Image (tube, rainbow, N blue to C red):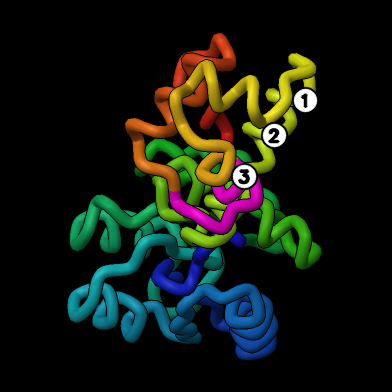
Amino acid sequence: MAVRHHIKVLVVDDDPQVCKMVGKILQENDYQVQTFTQARQALQAVRKSPFDVGLIDIKMPDIGGVELVEKIRAEDDRVALVVMTAYPDVQSAAETMRLGTRDYITKPFSEEQLLAALERIAKELGLIYTNEQELNRLIGQRIRQERLKQSLTLRQLSERSELTTSQLSQVELGKNAASIWALARISGSLGKQLCELLDGL
């Protein structure tokens, strides 16, 4: 299962309903969220604590979205910014992209569109990772699939890798975290590079 509870998201929109809706969606999907209806308050929050991602409305009364993007980038250039707007404006979009925003979402957007944009950015930044139990299961599943594809029994893989059938069985079932050495032995016995075996997990 992908882990997201450490990802801090800033949401800035002068419409309280949008803040409430976006905040609820993100919290339900395990993100840490702070929402603000005033750009100045959001800027103070950025000064106090780092955020990973910011969702910024482009049309706001106190500070415009383009200006807010610029100010946030000046405070912390590591935060990945996404602009939200109900009024698609090519010039504003181009300006915010020039200032370093990662994406642009047009309102109204669906829950799926919002989460897809956030997920894409979080993956690009290396913020989403798989928890240990799930990773063990996925590695074991990958090894078993590859072994069966090559019509190898556990005993044959054991002889090739010099690991016991019991060790291999535990790894395939995801019940044991295999060491890098053991995974290298297994992947080599399957005629694979270790990076090939783990690719995409």
Q: Is residue 167 above or below residue 114?
A: above
Residue 135 makes an appearance in the image: yes
Q: What is the x, y in percent for residue 34?
A: 44, 83
Q: Classify residue 56 as left or right of residue 109.
A: left
Q: Nearer the viewer, residue 15 or 1?
A: 1
Which residue lies under the disc numbered 2?
Answer: 144
Q: Is residue 36 above or below residue 5?
A: below
Mark 1 secondary-structure assignment = helix
Asked if labels 3 and 1 touch by Cβ distance under 8 angstroms, the answer is: no
Q: What is the x, y in percent for residue 110?
A: 80, 64
Quadrant in which residue 38 is drawn? bottom left
Which residue lies under the disc numbered 1?
Answer: 148
Mark 2 secondary-structure assignment = helix
Quadrant in which residue 169 is drawn? top right
Q: Which residues are magenta?
A: 169-177
Give yes or no for residue 175 being in the magenta stretch.
yes
Q: What is the x, y in percent for residue 160?
A: 52, 16
Please give the name of the residue rendered at 24% of the width and 51% of the height, measured from the top-left corner: 77
Separation (CA) of disc 2 from disc 3: 9 Å
Inspect the image, locate mark 3, and give the three-letter code of the amino acid beneath it: Ser
Q: Which image quadrant: the N terminus?
A: bottom right
Which disc is residue 169 wearing? 3
Q: What is the x, y in percent for residue 133?
A: 53, 61
Please give the name of the residue rendered at 35% of the width and 79% of the height, measured from the top-left corner: 42
Nearer mark to the viewer, of 2 and 3: 3
